[in-house]
Image (tube, helix red, strand yellow):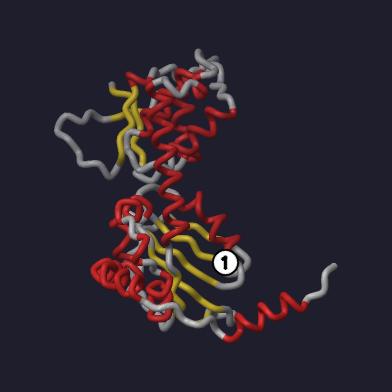
């Protein structure tokens, strides 16, 4: 009989925890336990899995706060082997209480890489998500819609950021991994996958004009740009359509800047200088 559990691909820590606890109380070590995703392609060699029954006198698992936080974080990763890793860390932490504080340990090093990838994914979502105005909500507030394609299950991570940042409008963020909605009072998360909507608004042209105006052709660093804004995000950003054109014209614009003659400062500059000279000393 093979011990194990079949979980959904987006299983959260709160859903994984009772299953892992049951397996731990049954005394099943990590190497004898299989975590299988329900969405994974079935194999002819896959044996039926059975959850073990806990022993009545088994001691409860104990985790330090840093280890618990680590497990909560890595279970938002999209790697389907995260369940095995989390259970192995849980098992080992009982005899190695300081395990989570050892970054050179192979399991912890792998978990920390996952944490870094999750944080980076959340940072990119906060930076590259674009809301579009789609009218008014039922309560008369402005209504906005956005689409993003995260790599990991980070919606619970980023929801507080968007709720704090955009409290004065109603909005919905749709992703292939679920959605976040805000109605001015309540933030709601859904794990139902969404389809990409057709997004455009009247401000898109204005935003592109602004983006072109602040582009400095003399300070192009394409490698750094692609590092901070990987190409996979370009398809959902209105301004990135302009990047090939701006890069192609950069050389010509730099030469024009070099040959441009000095121009007289605007009238308001003289007025400001005059006020500064006329201001009495404190």
Q: Report x, y in % for residue 274.
A: 69, 81
Residue at the outermost left position? 44
Q: How many marks?
A: 1
Which quadrant of the structure image shows residue 201? bottom left
Q: Is residue 163 above or below residue 36?
A: below
Rendered residue at 50%/64% (across/down): 181
| Residue closest to the eye, 85 or 233 | 233
Which quadrant of the structure image shows residue 233? bottom left
> In this view of the protein, can residue 53 be seen by the observer?
no
Rendered residue at 43%/63% (across/down): 129
Q: Quadrant of the C terminus?
A: bottom right
Q: Give the residue at mark 1.
A: 166
Rendered residue at 39%/17% (across/down): 29
**How would you rate the neighbour count of disc 1 (Cα within 10 Å): few for under 14, some for 14-19, many for 20 or more?**
few
Q: Quadrant of the N terminus?
A: top left
Q: Report x, y in % for residue 7.
A: 36, 39
Q: Report x, y in % for residue 259.
A: 33, 74
Q: Report x, y in % for residue 248.
A: 23, 68
Q: Is residue 160 above or below residue 87?
A: below
| Label 1 secondary element | loop
Q: Is residue 166 above or below residue 23?
A: below
Rendered residue at 51%/17% (across/down): 94
> In this view of the protein, can residue 163 be seen by the observer?
yes
Residue at the outermost right position? 282
| Residue closest to the eye, 248 or 237 | 248
């Amino acid at each position: 009989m093979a011990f194990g559990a079949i979980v959904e691909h987006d299983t959260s820590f709160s859903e994984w925890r009772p299953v892992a606890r049951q397996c731990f109380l049954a005394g099943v070590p990590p190497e004898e336990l299989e975590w299988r995703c329900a969405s994974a392609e079935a194999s002819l060699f896959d044996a039926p899995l059975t959850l073990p029954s806990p022993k009545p006198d088994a001691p409860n698992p104990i985790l330090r706060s840093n280890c618990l936080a680590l497990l909560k974080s890595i279970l938002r990763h999209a790697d389907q082997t995260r369940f095995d890793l989390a259970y192995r860390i849980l098992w080992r932490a009982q005899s190695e209480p300081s395990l989570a504080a050892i970054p050179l340990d192979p399991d912890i090093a792998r978990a920390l890489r996952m944490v870094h990838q999750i944080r980076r994914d959340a940072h990119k979502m906060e930076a590259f998500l674009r809301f579009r105005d789609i009218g008014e909500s039922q309560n008369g507030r402005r209504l906005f819609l956005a689409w993003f394609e995260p790599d990991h299950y980070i919606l619970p991570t980023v929801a507080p950021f968007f709720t704090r940042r955009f409290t004065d409008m109603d909005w919905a963020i749709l992703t292939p991994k679920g959605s976040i909605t805000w109605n001015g009072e309540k933030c709601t998360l859904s794990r139902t996958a969404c389809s990409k909507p057709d997004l455009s608004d009247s401000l898109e042209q204005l935003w592109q004009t602004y983006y072109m105006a602040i582009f400095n052709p003399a300070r192009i660093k394409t490698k750094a740009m692609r590092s901070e804004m990987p190409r996979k995000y370009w398809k959902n950003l209105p301004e990135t359509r302009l990047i090939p054109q701006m890069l192609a014209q950069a050389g010509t614009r730099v030469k024009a800047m070099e040959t441009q003659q000095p121009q007289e400062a605007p009238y308001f500059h003289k007025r400001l200088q005059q006020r500064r000279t006329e201001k009495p000393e404190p």
